[in-house]
Image (tube, rainbow, N blue to C red):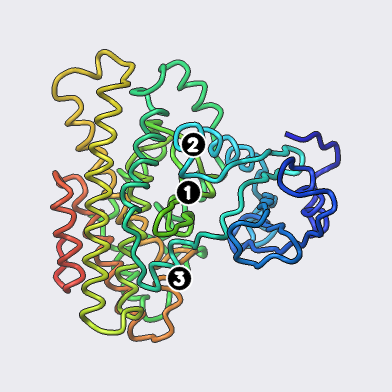
Amino acid sequence: MTENTSAYHPLTVEEAINVARTVTNVFYPTDELICDEIGDGNLNLVFRVRLAHSSESASHTPSLIVKQALPYAKVVGESWPLTLERARIESDALLFQGKLVPQLVPHVHYYDATLAMTVMEDLSDHVIMRKGLIEGNRYPLFADHISEFLAHTLFFSSDLGMNQQQKKWQVQRFINPELCKITEDLIFDDPYTNSPNNNIDEQLLADHAKLCADHKLHLEVALLREKFLTSTQALLHGDLHTGSIFITPHSTKVIDPEFAYYGPIGFDIGAIFANLLLNAAGHEHWSLDDQTREEHRTYLLSTLCEIWNRFDEKFRSLWDEHGVDRISRTKGYQDVYMEQILQDTVGYTGSKMIRRIVGLAHVADVGSIPNQAAKLRAQRIALQLGTALVKSNRRIRSIEEMFTICEHAYKGVYTS
């Protein structure tokens, strides 16, 4: 970490270049550097610093990312203030994850507390997974990579994989009340009421009214919210969607863990699943014909099942080999534990799908569809599937049952 005694202020392009020059073994002192502000998120400034005469997408030329937290949410403005402590949480989470799965997260060069700034590896030779999936691309190693990330980061931050007293101190380190409050409201409250935070297309107002009146759905959401509020099962990424993953056919990198906190394991897995299923819904438009659409959706549903099966296998293997708690080895406990994670995963998958259709922040997979009829079909598929998953989460006993619900939804057969 570099020493910085200046007061916090948003970085300029020139300052980002100067910051990048302080990182050893990346640039030569005589290098001419340029900087692009590339942040398109809701909460931060993101700069890419590179050699002046290198290609913007070059993969083998020196470059760095300088990421700075803003003291407010960009998506709303200064009327929505946020603590800069989230930058420290993000840096600590990346460092923790980097010790466990260094090949799956960007390398952190240093963190500056005064400027709420992290300097890290540039991943411009990768693409944002959301963009790749919209284009219909496939990533054959993704299920193995993301299940590895999930199994290791979640197991080794849980009471199963680390000393329980040390874990309690780590829970304290990752208390993240402001960003958790965003999640609590935007996922578990706003979508089910007439909140000013919602962003609902006019054609969906009647669909939203049904959500607001569905008391069975609200009960399940309340139970999921309770667990999100009270469970400290493991250290979560907290915002693990396909916009937080850089990818190539051979590499996967998980970024942006500023929402990291201790919560229920199924929340992270559900975030991945929800975004795969939202992309499948969005291919009402992005696929050019019915056969391509069906093949893409089959790929996504198969990927979803593969992620779960590989995660289940890897998590159990880590438990058997590295479990620190004697009583957790009680016969049958592991099966109960894993089934509960699956049920939570199903519930959080559904709740995240719903919020991405009627809540504040949509996803490009559906929200950027230019054809209004196709967009409406995709939105309704997502809402109906999300509702079915939330309502059924406590009855699910296998990933195959979840697969069947999803498969029926894309064929127009909905279960609740």
Q: Mark 2 touching mark 3, by CB under 8 A?
A: no
Q: Quadrant of residue 342?
A: top left
Helix, strand or loop status at disc 3:
helix
Q: Name the amino acid type tagged 2.
A: Gln
Q: Is residue 271 above or below residue 4?
A: below
Between 218 and 309, the residue placed more toward the observer is: 309
Q: Residue at x 58, y 42 (%)?
A: 107
Q: Which residue is mark 3?
A: 364
List the single residue furthest toward the top: 326
Image depth: mark 2 or mark 3 in front? 2
Q: Is residue 206 above or below residue 31?
A: below
Q: Residue at x 74, y 66 (%)?
A: 53
Categorize mark 1 by other alpha carbons within 10 Å: few (<14), some (14-19), many (20+).
many
Helix, strand or loop status at disc 2:
helix
Residue 309 is situated, as x and y percent measured from the top left of the image, at 22, 44
Q: Name the amino acid type tagged 1.
A: Val
Q: Mark 2 touching mark 1, by CB under 8 A?
A: yes
* Alpha carbon separation for disc pair 2 and 3: 28 Å
Quadrant, the N terminus: top right
Residue 44 is situated, as x and y percent measured from the top left of the image, at 65, 55
Between 186 and 310, the residue placed more toward the observer is: 310
Quadrant, the C terminus: bottom left
Q: Name the amino acid type tagged 3.
A: Ala
Residue 132 is situated, as x and y percent measured from the top left of the image, at 42, 67
Q: Which residue is mark 1?
A: 254
Helix, strand or loop status at disc 1:
strand
Residue 97: which disc? 2
- Number of marks in picture: 3
Between 383 and 220, the residue placed more toward the observer is: 383
Between 65 and 380, the residue placed more toward the observer is: 65
* Alpha carbon separation for disc pair 3 and 1: 19 Å
Q: Residue at x 72, y 42 (%)?
A: 25
